[in-house]
Image (cartoon, rainbow, N blue to C red):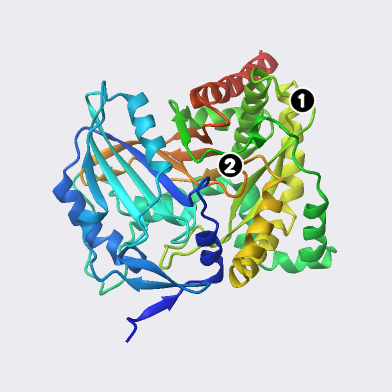
Amino acid sequence: MKQDREPMSAVDTAWLRMENDNNLMMIQTVLLLEGPLDLGRLRSVLEQRLLSFSRFRQRVVMEKEHAYWQDDPGFNLDNHVHRVGLPGKADMHELQAFCADLISTPLNFHHPLWQMHIIDRVDGQHSAVVCRIHHCIADGLALVRVLLSVADTTREGDRQAPNGDRPYHNTSWLERGRHLAHDLIEEATELVRHPDQLLELARAGWSAGAELARVTLQPRDPPTCLKRSLSGRKVVGWAEPLDLEAVKDVAHALDGTVNDVLLTCATGALRSWLLEQGDDVTQDLNVAVPFNLRPLDKPIDTLGNQFGLVLARLPIHLGSARSRLLEVQKHMRDLKASPQPWVFYGMLVGLGQGPDALEQAALEFLSSKASLVMTNVPGPQKPLYLAGARILQPMVWVPQSGGVGMGLSILSYAGTVQFGVVADQNLMTDPQGLVAHFHRSFEELASLVHAEQG
């Protein structure tokens, strides 16, 4: 007799089947902590909060082309939580190398598809947590909110009242983060907050078929070094975060949004890096941007994937920072009124229900339309604590799919904006170069403001 099992949704199945040797479908989060971490306290927190979500106790079982969730009969937290040390100087470089190795290594499909590595010593004074979760469990925004709900708003820990079998939710940071989220993804929320706008889009003449046709007819991205074949081995990098208030000041002075400024910084960074590689930058690039389709002001009671994608054009052909900002603003205004994320979401539903060969063909086609993936995830404005240790800096990377081999990550936290990159080794060997260009691109915009105000 088969154990009780739950069919996996079509969208989650689509993400499960996207995994291949070159692109593993894992979301990876890195939390840099102040001081040491109490492993016993962390395990207790995980048992109370993380494991209240059944997906973290269930493994994936396949029957022909159908996927199911089923409780792992041998579930043991020791299979998922590992304590490790870094070699050599145990500095940030070694931490990034360790993260790169993990993000290149598949999860164990005999158990629930997540792992957490605890690193006792980083730079002699910090500790770190590296968490890997398969994309079929949930999308990036949901997983970031779940992982951060495991944290507390004080070092001593938040009080929590017994509440039956309902998952624990640290709603205090969710409420505070809601306003920051609106600032960071202003262009990507209004349609979701007000579904009746879909009717307005329809009255304005938009249709899913017309939008799909428009995307299909877009030319392939130019053959830059971002289109090389993939090896399956990744590199990751990040740097000191930007001050969010400084980003807001620049955005206000230039009559834009925070999102406009960050996309413009990413555009400038890619332009500078591609020029260093000897690539032609006269043709613009498309970047696939996940678009949240779940309400930001409600707790995560269920996991799964609830997002679409938009293809945002990055005007790398423009040498002027001001010109790049104006072009980004115009393009984002157009996307705001587009049904594109819903079209891609519906496409994923269809692919998840169809044969695997059809999904792979569609995936290869769509990956030809973009050169990289970029995420912009809003986080809490106040510092959080994990098992009593203050979270200093979080980073998160979503996987790439098909032939796409680079991902850029923007994450807000505690008054800062974190920027990171993950890329296949065939595309990039030193991610810190691109990270440095992102910071220089922001300084270019800030200098523009100072010049105009002076």
**Residue 37 shows up from this direction:** yes
Image x and y of residue 343, in percent: 70, 62
Q: Which residue is mark 1?
A: 318
Dot label at residue 47: none
| The C terminus sits in image quarter | top right
Image x and y of residue 354, in percent: 63, 71
- Does 202 sit left or right of 391 as displayed? right
Residue type at tag 1: Leu
* Callout 2: SS: strand
* Callout 1: SS: loop
Residue type at tag 2: Met
Image x and y of residue 292, in percent: 57, 56
**Residue 45 shows up from this direction:** no
Residue extending furthest toward the bottom: 1
- At a point 75% along the width and 26% down the height, the residue shown is 281
Question: Reading the chain from its start, which is encountered first: label 2 or label 1?
Answer: 1
- Does 338 sit left or right of 12 as displayed? right
Q: Which residue is mark 2?
A: 374
Q: Is residue 346 above or below residue 224?
A: below
Q: Is residue 272 above or below residue 73?
A: above
- Which is nearer the eye, 183 or 273? 273
Q: Is residue 341 above or below residue 432?
A: below
Residue extending furthest toward the right: 205
| The N terminus sits in image quarter | bottom left
